[in-house]
Image: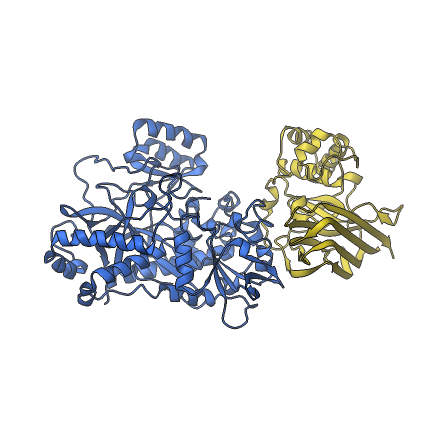
Chain colours: A yellow, B blue
Amino acid sequence: MRLNVLHKTHYTYDAPVPYGLQQVRLRPKSRLGQLVEEWRIDVTGGQVEVSFEDEHANAVDLVSFASGQTEIEITCAGIVDVEDKAGIVGPQGGYVPLWLFRRSTVLTKPGEHVQALADSAPANCSDLDRLHALSAHVLEQVPYSTDQTASDLTAEAVMEAGHGVCQDHAHVFITAARLLGFPARYVSGYLMMDDRVDQDASHAWAEAYVEGLGWVGFDISNGISPDARYVRVATGLDYRGAAPISGLRYGNAGEDMSVTLQVQQQ
Amino acid sequence: MKPANCVVFVATLRGICRLKVMSGRPTYFDEMFGHGTAARAPYADYSKWFADEDTARLLSKSEEAEALFRLIGVTFNVYGDPDATERLIPFDLVPRIIAAREWAKVAKGIEQRVRALNAFLHDIYHRQEIVRAGRLPAEMIARNDAFLPEMIGVSPPGDIYTHIVGTDLVRTGDDEFFVLEDNARTPSGVSYMLENRETMLHMFPELFSKIKVQSVGQYPRSLRKSLSACAPDACNGRPTIAVLTPGIHNSAYYEHAFLADQMSAELVEGHDLRVVDGRVAMRTTRGYKPIDVLYRRVDDEYLDPMNFNPDSVLGVPGIMDVYRAGGITIANAPGTGIADDKAIYSYMPDIVEFYTGEKAILQNVPTHRCSEPQALKYVLDNLADLVVKEVHGSGGYGMLVGPAASKKEIEDFRAKLEAAPGNYIAQPTLALSTVPILTDAGLAPRHVDLRPFVLVSPDRIDITPGGLTRVALTEGSLVVNSSQGGGTKDTWVLEE
């Protein structure tokens, strides 16, 4: 499937920002089942300082704000060809040892609720079935709801809240999968929802490492493994490691963010 | 922040400890007199000179030295002591003397070890061949807090990770040196080495004309040269070098300012720097000037609030990004602290062999890893004779010195050890060598250690002859660190 993506993130500030930086992980790469034909990032109100590849092989751009700016916009546009690989992403490449994906992070630190969820995963089945069952359990216990009170919740806090969005589902799944001994990671990317062109937000799902298969994707919120409608952009141990944009700025200016995202089949 | 300048080998939180005499009189190797009363060969000329000196005159020289240090401003801060923000480290004017032949072997051993350390750091942040080969358990890396995932796949210019190393050594006999710890992170103390020599040259010029001592004064020049050789590709022309200090309240601030001054580098704090046009640049009166090599004396955690501790005000946001893009050299590289871990230390003989194909020239202190059940049993049965250290600890905090501890201290420590054995290693108490100091009653032996300073660049390893000798000034004490009553001495390596 040939997907056309247009993704704008617009920040406005209620006072000039003297200095600020944003770390941008918004460049999908060609890989098994995903061919990036065209991709560009444009920044208005700032400039790309450096670009590098991080430890998870994400392409990262460091963007600085032009001094005294009250607006900054990051626009990504491109065309990506995606094949349905039944969620299979392939072997672990690069230098990151698999044990790193068993590490808990601030957002994926397990507590009693996630532990109970992990304990409820069926034992007498294949690893793959076990993970699919886990994914279904997460959605049962944390139904999808955009009625959110806070972003950047820990997996345990999400369980307590009892509802969440794709990011929350991914965190709970990753945390529980690690408790079950699977290396697991967070994926940020795009999903073309069939019924619309304008998507609400960029998407997030999870991947777990299954012996013999390698990395396998689980879109917990939709109860499936990613198919030809998914563009995989960045991975990390949790949201913070794979966040499309994370920033730091000086001064006390209040921030307002708006996102427009179009994903459509060409 | 942890104190940067008090790396200790034997210390307790409550200050000076004495090694109890278990049975009979311990026979320590004295570097001046050996086990006898006649001066050993390296001290022969000094000993003759000393015999003709008047002790009272020397003692007054001692006061002169202290006045000099106060004048120059060589001070250090003691943490947790509000009444003494700035103190002098006591200086003893009897030099520690090492023969050229003795030093050559030590230097060869250090060079081998430092090469292995850099190869190890490269490997750990790339393929981890040493783990694949089964020579180092993966948990040693996985459980190590100093392992920085952000460094995975990063190859700094020249593949140098640890540019400045302080390999702490102790001596136990005529030909017996042991490495106590490797300090691949940010070794401090080099300014004391330089000031000690300056002071000795000033006070006893006649001694240096009689006895040929290898110079240490070239260190700042060598440091500059060594760091310049590691400049990134982005550097245009003569490399701009800066020393990043946490600021005036840091215990080693004097040293940061001193080194910057001595090697004609900029002394900067985090707020002086920011990312400009793809480089890390320093604010000047004529705009921003890019830094090529940053000799940072700020710990990894505080280096970059965007990538590490977001609350840090000591670092530079985005510096890790510029670093990973090849726009700056950070010395020492982030993530090198993994090699300072005491459990990793216990594998150093294997590490040296794995990367150099040679047996280690310098010995490790035999180390029991309490994570291993048999070792733990041995350690628990012999707590009174052992030194037990926290694996990730530094600065001598949270350790047990068995022979100096009370029964209660040993039992309290036993409980801690049993609760988390993986956090500890244990070592025998070494019979550290002594070197005489000058007291009111004349020469008296005191225990010493040695921190040589090593500079690593792509084309050479430069080891300053000698280093910083730290001395436990209290009789019988094994505590050499400055915050707990230790002093320093000038260290002489004789010319051939």
- From what the image shows, is residue A12 above or below residue B357? above
Q: Residue furthest right?
A: A195
Left or right: where B4 falls relative to A30: left
Name the spot of residue B173 as percent of width and height, x first. 23, 51
Question: Residue drawn 32% across and 52% down?
Answer: B169
Name the spot of residue A174 as percent of width and height, x first. 67, 39
Left or right: where A35 falls relative to B423: right
Name the spot of residue B103 as percent of width and height, x first. 27, 60
- From what the image shows, is residue A62 above or below residue B415? below
Of residue A191 and residue A239, the one placed in the foreground of this image is A239
Of residue A189 and residue B383, the one placed in the foreground of this image is A189
- From what the image shows, is residue B2 above or below residue B60? above
Placement of the N terminus of chain A among the 4 image quadrants: bottom right
Question: Residue drawn 40% across and 60% down?
Answer: B259
Q: Is residue B340 visible?
A: yes
Q: Residue furthest left?
A: B52
Placement of the C terminus of chain A among the 4 image quadrants: bottom right
Task: Count every numbered label the image shows and give the total.
Answer: 0
Left or right: where B35 falls relative to B363: left
| Picture quadrant where residue B462 is located | bottom left
Question: Residue drawn 42% across and 42% down?
Answer: B393
Left or right: where B145 falls relative to A9: left
Of residue A251 and residue B335, the one placed in the foreground of this image is A251
Name the spot of residue A177 as percent of width and height, x first. 66, 38
Q: Is residue A229 visible?
A: no
- From what the image shows, is residue A192 above or below residue A41? above
